[in-house]
Amino acid sequence: MSAADQAAERSKRHRADVAPGEAYPEEDIAKGIRGYLIGLGLAVLLTACSFAVVRMNFIWAPAIPVAVIVFAIAQMGVHLVFFLHITTGPDNTNNVLALAFGVLFVVLLIGGSVWIMANMNHNMMHSPAPAPSHAHH
Amino acid sequence: MLGKLTLDAIPLSQPIPLIAAAVVGLVLLGVIAWTVIAGHFPYLWREWITSVDHKRIGVMYCILALVMLIRGFSDAILMRSHMLFAYKAPGYLPPEHYDQIFSAHGVVMIFFGAMPFMIGLMNFAVPLQLGVRDVAFPTLNSVSFWLTASGALLVNVSLVVGEFARTGWWPAPPLSEATYSPGVGVDYYIWAIQISGIGTLLSGVNLVTTILKVRAPGMSYLRMPMFCWTALASNLLIVAAFPILTATLAMLALDRYLGFHFFTDSQGGNSMMFMNLFWAWGHPEVYILALPAYGVFSEVISTFSGKPLFAYRSMVMATMAIFILSFMVWLHHFFTMGPGGDVNGVFAITSMIIAVPTGVKIFDWLFTMYGGRIRFHTSMLWSLGFMLTFVVGGATGVLLAIPPADFVLHNSMFLVAHFHNVMVSAVLFGAFAGYAYWFPKAFGFRLDEWWGKVAFWFGISGFVVVFGAFYILGLLGMTRRMQHYDVADWRPWILIAGFGVVLMLVGVVAQVVQLVVSIRRRESLRDETGDPWDGRALEWATASPPPVFNFAAMPQVHGEEAYWTIKAAAREQLSLRNEPDYAPIEMPINNPTGVVCAFFATLIGFAMIWHIWWLAVLGFLGAFATFVVFAWRDKAEYEIPASEVQRINRANRTTRLEALQGVGRRRAA
């Protein structure tokens, strides 16, 4: 393989394998700033919506928590796409895998802990305010 | 002014720790005095203490581990010999001291023996196997190492100043809360583990980044040597699991220092939550230690069988399956704590499933050996010893994964035998195999084989005798951590275990003698070519010891077993690859950031233990100032001129060519 080929391969590899926070050499700055501004706008909008549904009673009261959860999940999506630059492109496999890995382990740890501790409290009657037992019948 | 620290902190009434500490202290002072007087200190400072070279940091990790393994082993000798005198008698160690010894034994062996050894081997070998010049963040690597050393120092300081935890190697509340452990023992535990834990986490981040982002051209994931795969899995587990330990110990510290109620069992606290969180770190930790050892065995078995690793892809799959499953089994450490049958059942099944990928690995190693021309080098002996003894440990593990059986055996000597069986045979044997295997790469000469074999045979027979006796003691109903006993049935087995420790001691002494003998005979043990074992991965493609830049030119990888491919071509044509076009190489400049940070971290730890608040603030400011100075440095790299690279590489090419011509002559004759 000639030196030119090597250089070409290296730069190809480089483009396809960009570390988090590392800039694409050919990306233009204006486009980058526009992305952040759109993200900021969406994030502010979603935050405002959350406050709005809680403060103003234009939706049915029991649905408010659901609405807030929906806005929160949308907020996460906005952060992931516009600020953390998680995309589906081939250059992003590592970032997507890292995210999946983090989510998996957080779900395992928190889900597992809640399940184990609830089960244990139930068995050991440890809970300071035990639910009345006839509630289950 | 000095918080809780007074002269009473020095245990003048307890001769054993004081004498032990005095001996250690004198030896340490002697070594320091000798290096300073003989004028070696500037060299040590320039080339080792401030080094950011992954090879040197790896070597220093392994030296720390060897020293701390001896410390942990002397704790074991104290415990076993105490038990010889504790039949219907109080023995020679008072209970409050015996408690500290078994706690320190576990902490030292796991955090400062096994962990630094594995991280040291990964640090040393992974960048070489990937065909690159260093890890992704060289200075961070130095910080990681020195923070680990700082934690080890704090544990040893507890011998002389104050006391160590009496809680066992996991400080379980409510025993570890301020109410029941008012002394500084648990605080030593907390700060030693917090500081070294941060070092471990940084090292995990560093190695994950290195493996994912810094590889030689052509080294795709499925061309990486097996050791790099297991290192990747192990370091991903470090990144996922160590924050849990840090957070849990931070909560315990808040309970102890500021009267919080995370684990107090009153005012909403729950001590069971500590167990849950501790083992959510603790079980992945087992695989953080075992996976790199599996990688070492893969390299050693393949090299000394003269064959490629059997079913490489199934090995990768098994590694990554263990990686995921290791996060789903933690409850099996507290089956008896009160969860219901459904919870216990689920975790019992996951615990049994994790034995499947491990079994796949055993079969892959067996088939790698099948039909190979096996050379019984010391590192191969450790690998074979591992396979024979580890299947027993694995089988007793599957047994303990059955909750009804665990209810009988929980916290018995059977359990102690089981986890020593897996940890010693996987991690320690793996460490020794890796030590014998990569030693010539690190220092340019091989270890003496005869003493290595003595160490192996005494080590493994002592290990079988001690833990065989422990299994039987467990079945006879003996529980762990007993300070004395009066059951006649246990007596013979305790004597046998005591004899086993003597065998292990011979093994340890042989290991030390091996090092001394090898250094003295280094000229006759010299590794001239850089490939003493007829190796298969890229670390053998460069000189022993490798130049600071590892490779004169980045190797091009064209398949699995990168170096074997190159070597096969060279043997066929009886000539080396064409000489590369030499170019100047930029390498990071050594700097003292790591050791200075660790100095301030030690101050913080010591100050927090003894409630010397001003010193803690000072330590924190110093550590931050060190970071600022490093961040504002003007010059990060220096250049090695092309002519120098050429000179170093040509020297190695000459010896390799001679070796190759030797092969040619033998073929012709």
Image: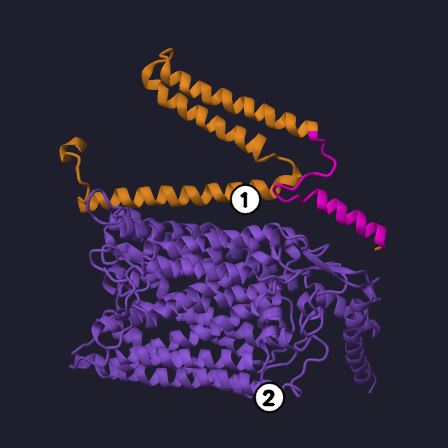
Q: Quadrant of the C terminus of chain B?
A: bottom right
Q: Could you say where residue A34 lies in the image, as x and y percent from the top left?
A: 64, 25
Tell me which colouring the rendered structure shows.
by chain
Q: In the figure, is residue A85 to the left or right of B349? A: right
Q: Residue at x 58, y 70 (%)?
A: B45
Residue A98, numbered label: 1
The amino acid beneath tag 1 is Ala
Query: The disc numbered 2 marks a residue on which chain?
Result: B
Does residue B404 appear anywhere in the picture?
yes
Tell me the residue that label 2 is attached to: B520
Rendered hue of chain B is purple
Task: Find the distance from the CA under tag 2 to the CA under tag 1.
Answer: 49 Å
Query: The disc numbered 1 marks a residue on which chain?
Result: A
Q: Residue at x 43, y 58 (%)?
A: B195
Q: Badge 1, how many Cα within 10 Å: few under 14, some, many 20+?
A: few
Rendered hue of chain A is orange
Q: Could you say where residue A56 lies in the image, as x and y percent from the top left?
A: 37, 13
The amino acid beneath tag 2 is Arg
Was residue B406 drawn as part of the magenta stretch in this picture?
no
Under circle 2, the secondary element is helix
Write down the region rendered in magenta: A2-29
- For the residue pair B305 and B532, the one nearer the viewer reads as B532
Does residue B237 appear anywhere in the picture?
no
Residue B475 location, quadrant: bottom left
Q: In the figure, is residue B129 to the left or right of B88? A: right
- For the residue pair B99 and B496, the one nearer the viewer reads as B99
- For marks 2 and 1, give the one nearer the viewer: 2
Query: Extreme top residue here?
Result: A58
Under circle 1, the secondary element is helix
